[in-house]
Image (spheres, coloured by chain):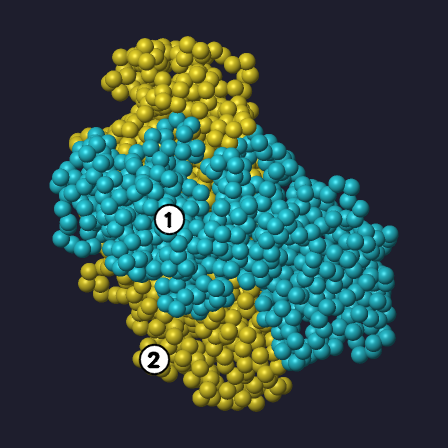
Chain colours: A yellow, B cyan
């Protein structure tokens, strides 16, 4: 999906998709039965068939067949190809333009919307061939129709081998999130697949299997065949069985809507939300997510007051926070699903203390190679960014304490940046300076010192590095640059001596802290962007200089401090990069450390690591840090671990995800994004780009009435809004813009869509995935422009 | 799998399994080609076909076919049924005893072992029909053959609809952890499935697709057919293509072994293990896990020195720590896999701040209902036990602080039990008293007071409650009981006044602490068993009394303390049950609080929650606790959250897992375990039982030379060994017994197997899953008996 598409859900319309376990299993007979019985039982309603793609001259016969045997049922074929082969081959052979998946789905939705507009009724979408038969574009139908999320009737195979075909087809649908509501199969006296299938689907999936008598065999005489079919369709047992199926489908349709509509109220009563003031959250504020595909959630639309028509119940919502910064390769990506399923099927979880399995090892090697950091050689697995940071801190503090000869009772802190944030477990919280996130938390005790830093912003169309008032005395108020690239060209800037002021400021600060007797065990930085701290883009030269000063000045941390002999050893302090948010292509590169040109001793990776599927975290460390914990005494070990450490599902998914992003980089999949004004002559590997067009960011920043500035890098767009009440987490700034995005677009092909964006204080950000299309970006920038201008 | 079975892997033998995408896709022709070409290219080796199950009289013809066209290839059918229908139907119709899955697989392995013993060669296991065609027992073949873990050749379907059949069949195999190494398909000029499939499998799965010319059509003349087939098999292009496939399979066999054999060394270089002193860990100590099924890992067997024969490379290892206490429903359980895949396909991950999705809500409701705790009404999701405890502590401390009017600077502790352990993040660590786990950790600072407690053990055949020396003064040295059930009958014991001494001791302790000015914000307990603290079974009456005293004595915690009006409100201190280890049927019941007959205000659940697949944790809380955080000020909220909060994959898997365990309870699946001497007349719901036989536990405890005692409850068996050096985490006691279990059994049907058990100080425990079979338990108790006696 390159553009939004609302799933098919109206109160009035039971829209079901009919898939076949194989070709030639009787789909047409079953849909004819469903259609004519629906007409009979719901005689005042409309019943429609939609055949999105049909191949072979049989289609005309189908039309006639339905016309004859299911009178009053309307029937439409969107794309008809005469050659009786798979749709992709037929489409190629036809010489006609091949419809894109988006176009085909939009036509399906339009048809369904038209049906819904006509009042109560039924719609059956009949697919072609088997579940994975390729559609005209080549995408298999099981993949193609996912965004419609129509519940499914699976026509089983009653022939020899049909048990296997039916179960496999079901599994292919299931692992794409389809709800198969009913399995239909002919009764065959010889193979009796029905008996097995009914038991299997009841036991394993709670899905009812209904059998129908076999239709009469075809003869050579068309007229006689027609009479026989008429008799067959008229049989009481056929109608009775089909009627039961339809009643089940009717009930399930109601249950689906009732369930969706009840979720917000239930959640309001029973869910305790993370990071949410529930005193301010009514049931109407809770967004119900029916499913998600690509970059879009399918969300329950707010009930329209006095709606004249039967409004669509679902709309597509662009996942503008990349689901809390996790989403890389699109929701419901079948490659990730299959990776997860493969590892689940091969291992489940296997404990990871002194054991090893292929996915954990392969992922460890892939990450170590990808980092291109000669210091890193060890991988420690944990469950999320917070735990990974706790691990990193345990590593760093121990290394510093032992080298500098401090006792366990010594009060050690971390050195960081103001507004840095590393997670919500107590140890991770203690790495952040006091702020609204942690002020009221009983055991919180910030341990460390946090430096102020200059930031990067595009304001009124111009890119610059600025310092706030406190810093300006030491660093000057700000400097303008021709482009973001120029700001990121840290070597050129260093060559020009721009880092000198930073060096002096940092050295003076560290000297003062030393004089105060403060002791530090690690330098912890989020490279380039402080995420939770307010989407601040930090001057990369400042972070680079900070690391360099710390490394070049071991004597500032301990009288024992001296430069280590091994160039891969840590110096001054162990340097920890918290790449949980900024790592793994968020900012366009494998690691944000490449922007800084310095290598950490420890780095932490999560979120995008698994492409947005399951929690997993890795803390990478240098061999010198690892050695500190190695002895013959068990209690010297790094005594940290979680039961699901290196769970194979997470490792396999991460492996798939990281490799896919690496392949995207190699293939140049982001060329369109680079070409949006970002490309600089220095070329790939050193360039600075975003999925958001440069011109658009500069334009936004010129809305000086409402905006203080904006920036974009990688998949992130941050808009800093003017807020009379002042910035900070508790601020309600940017909510107006957020609401405009949330209203979105009501009409248009593909149905209603909006943007679900998150706000951090006075900053509204929109975060794309690594697979967001140019089309989506263009639609969202359009909406943003309008919302800001209004 | 009810008993161990080693997977098929020998250096000498390339054993491949041949699955068909459907029935009648040409499996016999392809295997004949593979066989004859293997004979030709590896002329000094043996080539064998094994057909585990064959239906239809065609099999004789198959034998003749192979004899004629693949001369020199040996051929065996294990189970032959004459009726040409699915094996399960044929087996039923035959009237002969139906082989069990275990028996059938053991025969397959025996045959493969015999092949391997004869030197280098090839073995092709040919399945019947399609991938999901049911085997004689009714288990589909795709499920049945998983434990053999033979890499797979998939014969694709070249007919109309065959693209769909081939992809679906592949997916059914893949989600069971099969490695499909090659797809073979006939070239069909009309449908050209080959072209699509080759591209699809290369792009999505990196699997080569090879085409072979179609065999001649059959005529009515058998002699002419035979000649035509002879000519076909002799065709250079057929042989050449098959040769390429075989060379690929030969290479992949070598690569698989090389990869497995390299893992331990790589891990030794690059993995940083949780909770492991790597200075004591050589590459030879690292266990390589190839896969896992049911209760058994497949582990790389240590290289036998001077092995005369080609030893099997894999053995099955009973997962005796239930993979760090996570495993409930068996490794590679297809129901859990499909649940994970469904949620991945429907949602991927969707952010959970003010949103709701069905699996999160359904799981929340299922847990709240299952707990039968009228206090609990809220569910907070996080990623693992550690984070869930941090959440619980944040909840408890805030509630107590606000009710008792303490400031944020107040030093608050938790009340707990000595040896209690709640996880490795800093906040969770701070809930545990100083011990070897945390003593050297820089930021650790135990915050609280931890009471000593009486324990339950069976010693020298007798069950008793004992107190250590420190406690004995207050509580007496110990009391004997007729059975574990009598100890757990807390109401009868209370009726007899046994809790009085506990009450007095606890009240005195709390009074003393109050006099010292200590302040507490929560009582945190692991109900019934202290896991990480040394597998100690706590006297349930003591824990019950502790909760009751805390609740009845609010004045002991604050001068403001008084009993709340609402009986569902917390009193004294918020009571937190850490049920991460003991909850969700580990001890035979949904919640261990039912043993105590008291309800917590907050409870934490993880590990078994997802049945052993992916990390997930829930912290359940009462409405009164929730209300404390509700206001119109954002910073009053519980500011905790993780990106993957309530990830749909975890919620869906947990839902499946919890519901399945509830169904097992309802169905009485554990009747066999209860009947092992545990059943007491009070009946279900109140009974106390274990998967480990009571007689066996009592017998073990009589090995007074080596054992101080033992206990079993639910799936846990703990053996407390005598250790001259004293107990404690750092102790090396029990290692001898662990090594004996690790040696296991060398021979026997099903191949070599052993038990991978974990040791905590002087305690060796073996933990079954909730699906472990009576057979496995019997085998392991046999091995334990021998090991202890030797």
Image quarter for residue B50?
bottom right
Above or below for A476 versus B331: above
Q: x and y percent of residue A366 in the render?
A: 56, 36
- In this rendering, the count of numbered labels is 2
At mark 2, the secondary structure is loop
How far is disc 1 from disc 2 in space, using C-alphas?
75 Å
- Chain containing mark 2: A
Above or below for A422 versus A120: above
Q: x and y percent of residue A713 in the render?
A: 40, 32
Mark linked to residue A529: none
Q: Nearer the viewer, residue B627 or B451?
A: B451
Residue at the image point whose x is 40% and y is 79% from the top: A244
Label 1 vs label 2, nearer the camera:
1
Q: x and y percent of residue B312 in the render?
A: 71, 50
Q: In this view, does B144 lie to the left or right of B417?
A: right
Q: In this view, does B204 lie to the left or right of A778?
A: right
* Tags 1 and 2 touching, CB below 8 Å: no
Q: Quadrant location of the C terminus of chain A?
A: top left
Residue bearing the label numbered 2: A42
Image quarter for residue A181?
bottom left
Residue bearing the label numbered 1: B478
Q: How crowded is mark 2: few (under 14 residues within 10 Å), some or many (20 or more)?
A: some
């Amino acid at each position: 999906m390159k553009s939004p598409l609302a799933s098919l859900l109206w109160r009035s319309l039971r829209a079901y998709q009919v898939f076949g376990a194989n070709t030639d299993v009787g789909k047409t007979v079953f849909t004819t039965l469903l259609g004519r019985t629906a007409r009979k039982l719901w005689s005042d309603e409309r019943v429609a068939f939609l055949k999105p793609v049909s191949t072979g001259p049989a289609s005309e016969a189908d039309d006639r067949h339905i016309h004859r045997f299911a009178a009053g049922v309307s029937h439409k074929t969107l794309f008809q190809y005469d050659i009786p082969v798979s749709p992709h081959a037929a489409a190629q052979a036809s010489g006609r333009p091949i419809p894109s998946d988006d176009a085909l789905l939009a036509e399906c939705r339009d048809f369904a919307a038209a049906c819904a507009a006509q009042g109560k009724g039924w719609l059956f979408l009949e697919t072609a061939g088997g579940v994975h038969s390729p559609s005209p574009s080549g995408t298999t139908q099981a993949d193609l129709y996912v965004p419609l999320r129509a519940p499914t009737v699976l026509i089983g195979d009653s022939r020899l081998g049909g048990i296997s075909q039916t179960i496999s087809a079901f599994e292919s649908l299931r692992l794409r999130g389809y709800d198969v509501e009913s399995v239909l199969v002919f009764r065959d006296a010889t193979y009796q697949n029905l008996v097995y299938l009914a038991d299997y689907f009841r036991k394993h999936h709670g899905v009812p299997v209904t059998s129908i008598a076999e239709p009469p065999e075809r003869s050579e005489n068309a007229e006689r065949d027609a009479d026989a079919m008429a008799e067959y369709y008229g049989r009481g047992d056929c109608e009775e069985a089909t009627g039961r199926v339809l009643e089940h489908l009717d009930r399930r349709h109601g249950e689906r809507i009732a369930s969706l509509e009840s979720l917000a109220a239930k959640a309001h009563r029973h869910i305790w939300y993370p990071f949410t003031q529930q005193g301010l959250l009514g049931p109407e504020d809770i967004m119900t997510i029916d499913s998600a595909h690509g970059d879009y959630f399918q969300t329950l639309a707010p009930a329209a007051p006095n709606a004249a028509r039967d409004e669509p119940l679902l709309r597509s919502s662009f996942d503008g926070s990349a689901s809390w910064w996790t989403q890389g390769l699109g929701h419901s990506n079948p490659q990730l699903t299959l990776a997860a399923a493969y590892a689940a099927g091969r291992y489940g979880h296997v404990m990871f203390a002194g054991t090893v399995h292929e996915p954990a090892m392969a992922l460890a090697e892939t990450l170590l190679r990808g980092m291109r950091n000669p210091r890193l050689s060890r991988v420690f697995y944990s469950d999320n960014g917070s735990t990974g940071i706790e691990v990193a801190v345990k590593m760093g503090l121990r290394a510093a304490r032992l080298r500098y000869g401090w006792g366990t009772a010594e009060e050690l802190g971390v050195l960081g940046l103001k507004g840095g944030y590393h997670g919500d477990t107590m140890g991770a919280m203690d790495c952040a300076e006091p702020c609204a996130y942690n002020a009221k938390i009983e055991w919180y005790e910030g341990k460390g010192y946090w430096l102020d830093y200059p930031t990067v912003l595009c304001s009124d169309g111009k890119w610059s590095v600025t310092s706030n008032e406190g810093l300006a005395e030491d660093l000057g108020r700000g400097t303008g640059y021709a482009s973001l690239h120029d700001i990121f060209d840290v070597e050129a800037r260093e060559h020009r001596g721009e880092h000198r002021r930073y060096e002096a400021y940092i050295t003076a600060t560290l000297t003062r802290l030393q004089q105060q007797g403060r002791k530090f065990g690690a330098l912890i930085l989020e490279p380039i962007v402080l995420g939770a701290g307010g989407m601040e883009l930090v001057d990369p030269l400042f972070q680079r200089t900070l690391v360099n000063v710390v490394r070049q000045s071991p004597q500032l941390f301990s009288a024992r401090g001296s430069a280590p002999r091994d160039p891969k050893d840590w110096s001054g302090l162990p340097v920890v990069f918290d790449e949980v948010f900024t790592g793994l292509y968020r900012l366009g590169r494998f690691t944000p450390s490449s922007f800084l040109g310095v290598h950490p001793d420890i780095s932490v990776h999560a979120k995008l690591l698994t492409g947005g599927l399951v929690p997993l975290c890795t803390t990478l460390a240098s061999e010198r840090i690892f050695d500190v914990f190695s002895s013959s005494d068990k209690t010297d070990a790094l005594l940290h671990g979680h039961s699901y450490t290196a769970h194979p599902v997470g490792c396999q998914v991460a492996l798939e995800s990281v490799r896919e992003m690496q392949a995207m980089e190699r293939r140049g999949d982001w060329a369109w994004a680079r070409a949006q004004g970002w490309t600089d002559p220095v070329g790939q590997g050193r360039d600075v780009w975003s999925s958001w067009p440069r011109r658009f960011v500069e334009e936004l920043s010129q809305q000086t009435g409402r905006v203080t500035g904006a920036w974009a890098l990688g998949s992130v767009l941050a808009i800093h809004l003017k807020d009379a009440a002042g910035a900070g987490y508790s601020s309600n700034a940017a909510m107006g813009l957020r609401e405009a995005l949330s209203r979105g677009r009501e009409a248009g092909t593909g149905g209603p869509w909006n943007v679900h964006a998150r706000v951090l204080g006075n900053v509204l950000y929109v975060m794309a995935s690594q697979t967001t299309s140019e089309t989506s970006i263009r639609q969202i920038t359009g909406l943003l422009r309008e919302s800001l201008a209004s």
